[in-house]
Image (spheres, rainbow, N blue to C red):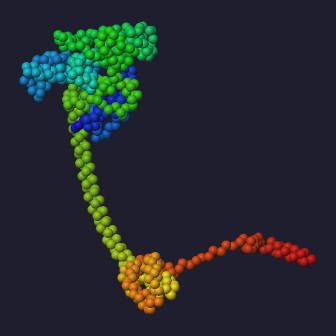
Amino acid sequence: MAKDQVVAIDIGTSTVKILYIEKIGDVLHLINADIMSNPHPESPEQTSDTIKQLWNRIGIKQNIFNKHRMEVGVAIPRGSVVTKRLPNIPPSTTDDQLPAVVEMAAETELPFQPEESIFTFHDVQRFTDVLSVELVSTRRETVTRYTEALNTIGPTPSGVIPSMLAIETVARGQLSDSSGRTIIVDIGAGITDFCLMHGNKLQFSRAFHVSGDQLTRTLMTEMDVDAETAEQEKQHIPADQPPTRTWTRRFIVELERSIAAAERELNNEEPEEIEEIWLCGGGARVPELAEACQEQLQIPTRLWNPVYASAIDTSNVPSGTLESYGDTLAVPLGVGIHLLDAEQPVSLLPTEVGVKRAESSRKHQQLIAAGIAGFLLLVIALCGITYSRSQQSKLDLLDQQIATFTQLQTDANKQLALELILADKLSHQISPLDVLHAFSTLFKDRTKVAWKTFEVHNLDDLGKTRISCSLHANSIEEINSMHGVLNRAKLFSNIELGEITTTGDERRPTFEVKLTCRLTNEAIQMFAQKRHPKPVIEIVELELEDVNVSPPAENSESSEKSAENRNEENEEGEE
């Protein structure tokens, strides 16, 4: 199953850090990150409760479908891990044979009893006559302590990654094969990881205890203050100023010892120059620590934020969060990227835990598949029954609708026939008199233009209607004027004049022409409006003073009294 989500957890001596990373296509996205104080690291119950709170705070949503698609990785500190190069492996060993050969060779090289240890290997180097690997081992009880701390969150861990390999994974995003030697120092609360990179590959690593907690204890002793005050003071006192200067000297001495140890282990007769030192972790926030290291070691030194060094999308996380504690996330970030990108992660997870997780994942997948198959069968059966019933119901309903529609169609045909008859009776029918009246209205002066003959054909169908008449006129101008009037009347179309002939004597000639035309589509409505004009309603406005309205009588007694009063007033007026 493809890995696309990972939750990386770093259990430190004073804090617990957790990152939620998702892989979409080839792009890694940082979904959320959080950190919480772990005041009682020696208590497994307190540590487990802290991890559960962080798990809930970053909003990890688990369900039956993604439970086993989510990788959960935990970091193990470099101080709990032992590394050793195994150089004497037969060069003819194949990749399939290599795990068994390394297991046999490791029995004599492990610093612990075989039954008490867990080991793995990486960095396989093949040459013509040489084959070597780097052996990574730790105590079983150490791994158990870290994995059992995750019991409260539910999922089984899928990887236990050494911190130095996590730092190497993050640094690869900023270093290339052609890069020189770079030292990365992750200063934690209880332990500091020293990693020597050559190009983008880890060459040497170790851990030492000059860390943030030691600085706090130094300030408590020399300043005679409590732990809380010392934690605040170490954020303001520069590295080269007392009492922080005491811790800074110890720190630089450990850096020098680590560089010397690396040279001894690598057996470089002419060691390459170290190009730069990168400081990260909470202890790197000591003011002017990078400047003090650069001055003492004569090596360029700077602070390093691993979140911005890796090729990961951080747009989902507020920039203020990354600025606040992004420099402390090198280890959990490397654990997440290592689990998502590596084909075979370098993990110290016990074999039985991995087998248990694989078996649980397999059973989980089978359960999901069986549940989905049963659900699909149930859905298919229910759909079949429902479909059969719905089809029968549709057939019954269709029969009813057909019967209803048949009756409605019969009724509609009868009603339509009646309405067509009524419409035919009520519709206006053009008569020859309408046409003749139109001609008479257009040409009132018979002295100028007169009709000799008048014929109308097919008035029932406007498309076939044809009107023809013979006209007499006193002049050709009158004929042309008559033609223009007909064109503007909007009643007639296709107006054509025949050949004009002349009759009578020369003094008073008479011009005769035959005219043919048709009726326009608007003719029916225009003839109907002329025959049946709309009634004109006259509105009469009355003046208020012309209207005499008597007030309503209150009752019969008041009416009688009013009448008596009016009679008395009339009598007084007469007198």
Q: Is residue 47 above or below residue 111?
A: below
- Horizontal side of 436 relative to 564 (left or right) equals left
Q: Position of residue 352 (x, y in %)?
A: 21, 29
Query: What is the x, y in percent for residue 280?
Result: 33, 20
Q: Quadrant of residue 46?
A: top left
Nearest the viewer among 548 and 153 is 548
**Does 347 sit left or right of 561 as displayed?**
left
Nearer to the camera, 321 or 454: 454
How many circles with numbers are drawn on the protein?
A: 0
- Quarter-of-image position of residue 318: top left
Position of residue 285 measured from the top left corner of the image (x, y, whole percent): 38, 18
Image quarter in which the N terminus is found? top left
Q: Residue at x 37, y 27 (%)?
A: 322
Q: Nearer the viewer, residue 374 or 540?
A: 540
Residue at image coords 90%, 75% = 572
Q: Is residue 358 among the parts visible in the rendering?
A: yes
- Asked whether residue 438 is in view, the answer is no
